[in-house]
Structure formats: structure tokens, C-alpha cells
Amino acid sequence: MTDHPALSGAHEAEYAGRVSKQIPGLGDMHLMAGLLLAEHVPTNGRVLVLGAGGGLELKAFAQLQPDWQFDGVDPSDVMLNQAHHTLGSLASRVRFHEGYIDDAPDGPYDGAACLLTLHFLPEAERRRTVTQMAKRLKRGAPLVVMHHSFPPVETDKWLSRYSAFTNAKGASPIGLQQIGMMKRKLPVLSPNEDEAVLRDAGFEDIDMFYTAFTFKGWVCKKV
């Protein structure tokens, strides 16, 4: 899900608590994402989760829909191991794949989610990744995405606000050095550009369902 170091076993609650301080309303966002998927994914559906390391969204989806099956893809074996610990017995319903979108099975899937992942990808790779996700979905299948999204010309303003939020929540302080690193690592697009990426990849009915400081989330359907 993110590039945070994984914890295991007794430290699962600590890991989840730390991440929840960094993303406003994380647990509710996962619940909303699951409910949006469930509008179109059948009760016995198969769902692709790209950026599944950590396992928090997989756990939320699996608890919401007890008969869904999942393929979880993430480039970090450490984070996939964390996902195993987070899911516990629910991990039996997930097939894990270390890698990127090209390492995901062909599907076709009844739905997909990609949370806190696309903001790491430059625009060209982001477009390719979303297009490859679309190719793995059935017609009319939903996709839910959420990531940093704000006008690049306002990067300093929005990252300063995000820093203030995480500091107020008691997360690890984000100072000028960390903000500078985020500016280098995150090829952020504006919300309009993010919606264009989805539309050009073959999605329609694009609705924003989540907005919280620097983060935006959308649900859409495969054309």
C-alpha cells in the first residue's frame, strides 16, 4: 500500500495505527472503497488489488464480503509478508504476487482497487498501469483509486498542509527535508489530470468519493 517499513506479528496494530495517522479517515476510506466495489462486484466475485502490501484494504474488503477472492500485487516482499500477518486466516482467500501490474494475472476480474500507489508513478507509467488494469477487468467492472492529487503548481502549499496534519495527529514529524523528498518522489497530477488518465484508459462514470487535504479518491467503471 505504501513504502513504509513492514512490521509483523504483535506489531500489526502499531503498523495500522501509524499509517492511519498519515492518511485522514483511512479506515473509513477502505470501507467506502469496499462498498463502492460491492455495488457491481458479485458476492462471489474476484477482485484485483494493486499495491496490496500491508494488507489493510484487503482485510477491509475481505471482512465486508466473505465470499470474494483476491489477487494482491505489490513490488515489496516485505510488505506482502506484512499483508499475510495483517490478514491472518483471511489470507487463504488471497493469491499474492510480487511485482507490478505486468505480474498480475490476466483476469478477467469483477473489480479492482489501487490505493495509495499511483502517485508514485510518472504520468506515462501511470497511464500504462491504469490501461493494463482496464484490460484485466470485465466490461462494467468497477475500479477504485486513491492517492495524492493536487495541482502541481500548489505543491508547496498542499505538502505543508499535509505536514501540519500528520504532525497534529502525532505521526512522525514531516519537516522541510521530508517535504523536499516527497516533492522529488511524487510525480503528482492535478485532479483533472487524474480523471483524464482514467478516462483515456477506458473508464467512464468517474466519480470522486473521497477528498482529504492532499488525497483524492475516485470510483469508475470499465467501458
Image (cartoon, rainbow, N blue to C red):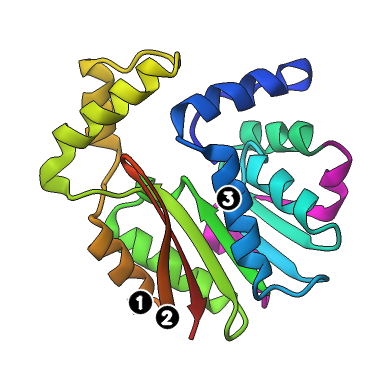
* Amino acid type, residue under disc 3 in the picture: Gly
Callout 1: SS? helix
Instruction: Give yes or no for contact between labels 1 and 3 (Cβ–Cβ under 8 Å).
Output: no
Give the magenta range.
Answer: 88-109
State left or right for residue 204 relative to residue 70: left
Residue identifier under label 3: 99
Q: Is residue 19 visible?
A: yes
Which quarter shows the N terminus?
top right
Q: Which residue is depicted at the point 70% across and 73% down? A: 41
Q: Is-magenta flag for residue 103?
A: yes
* Residue under pointer 2: 204
Q: Residue at label 1? A: 199
Give me the C-alpha separation between circle 2 and circle 1.
6 Å
Crowd band around label 2 with a 10 angstrom C-alpha radius: few (<14), some (14–19), many (20+): some
Q: In the visual, does 203 lie left or right of 188? A: right
Q: Earlier in the sequence, mark 2 or mark 1?
A: 1
Which mark is on residue 127?
A: none
**Which residue is drawn at the image coordinates 67% and 78% (left, top)?**
108
Which element is circle 2 on? Answer: strand
User: How far apart in space, not on screen, are marks 3 and 2 (Cα)?
Assistant: 27 Å
Q: N-terminal of the two: label 3 or label 2?
A: 3
Q: How many marks?
A: 3
Q: Nearer the viewer, mark 1 or mark 3?
A: 1
Identified at 53% across, 67% down, the residue is 143
Tag 2: residue type? Answer: Glu
- Identify which amino acid the numbered label 1 is placed on: Arg
Question: Compared with residue 202, is residue 55 higher up or lower down, i.e. above or below?
Answer: above
Q: Residues within 10 Å of mark 3 (few under 14, many from 20)?
A: some
Side of 145 where 163 appears, left or right? left
